[in-house]
Image: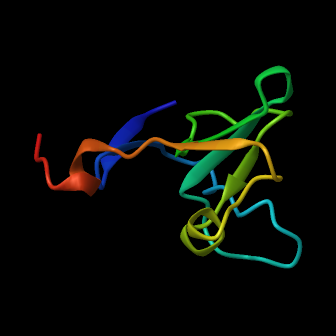
Amino acid sequence: MASIVVAGRIATLGVAMRRCSRTACTAEAVATLTYDYADSLAVLGPLSFTREPHSYDLCARHAERTSAPRGWQVIRHAMLGEVGFSA
């Protein structure tokens, strides 16, 4: 299967873009959220290359509004282009 780079991300030709995991949201996913229950940690980063069964793909709106339960820490990983750096 062929791949191309689109907006700094690798996209596979012939494969549909992933949608947000939130119920009734049809927006395109741009971030992946995972939880580490042992460390009370939520990690939000760029969209993973493959769908993982224990993570959540989120659109930009839902990724921005994501919070964690009281006592948990949220770590947000940004891509270099998102914080003013250019590759």
Tell me which residue sits at (57%, 52%) in the image: 31
Is residue 8 toward the left or the right of residue 33 in the image? left
Between 48 and 72, the one nearer to me in the picture: 72
- The correct choice, above or below, for 39 with respect to 18 in the image is above
Query: Residue 75: horizontal and vertical position, in percent?
Result: 55, 41
In the displayed orientation, state which residue is furthest to the top.
Answer: 38
How many numbered marks, from 0 up?
A: 0
Between 6 and 29, the one nearer to me in the picture: 29
Query: Residue 66: horizontal and vertical position, in percent?
Result: 68, 62
In the displayed orientation, state which residue is furthest to the left.
Answer: 86
In the displayed orientation, state which residue is furthest to the front.
Answer: 71
Tell me which residue sits at (82%, 67%) in the image: 22
Quarter of the rendering containing residue 17:
bottom right
Is residue 64 toward the left or the right of residue 38 in the image? left
Q: How is the image coloured?
A: rainbow
Query: Residue 58: horizontal and vertical position, in percent?
Result: 67, 59
Query: Residue 63: horizontal and vertical position, in percent?
Result: 61, 62
Q: Quadrant of the C terminus?
A: top left
Tell me which residue sits at (66%, 69%) in the image: 62
- The correct choice, above or below, for 20 with respect to 87 in the image is below
Tell me which residue sits at (83%, 52%) in the image: 69
Quarter of the rendering containing residue 19:
bottom right
Between 87 and 33, the one nearer to me in the picture: 33
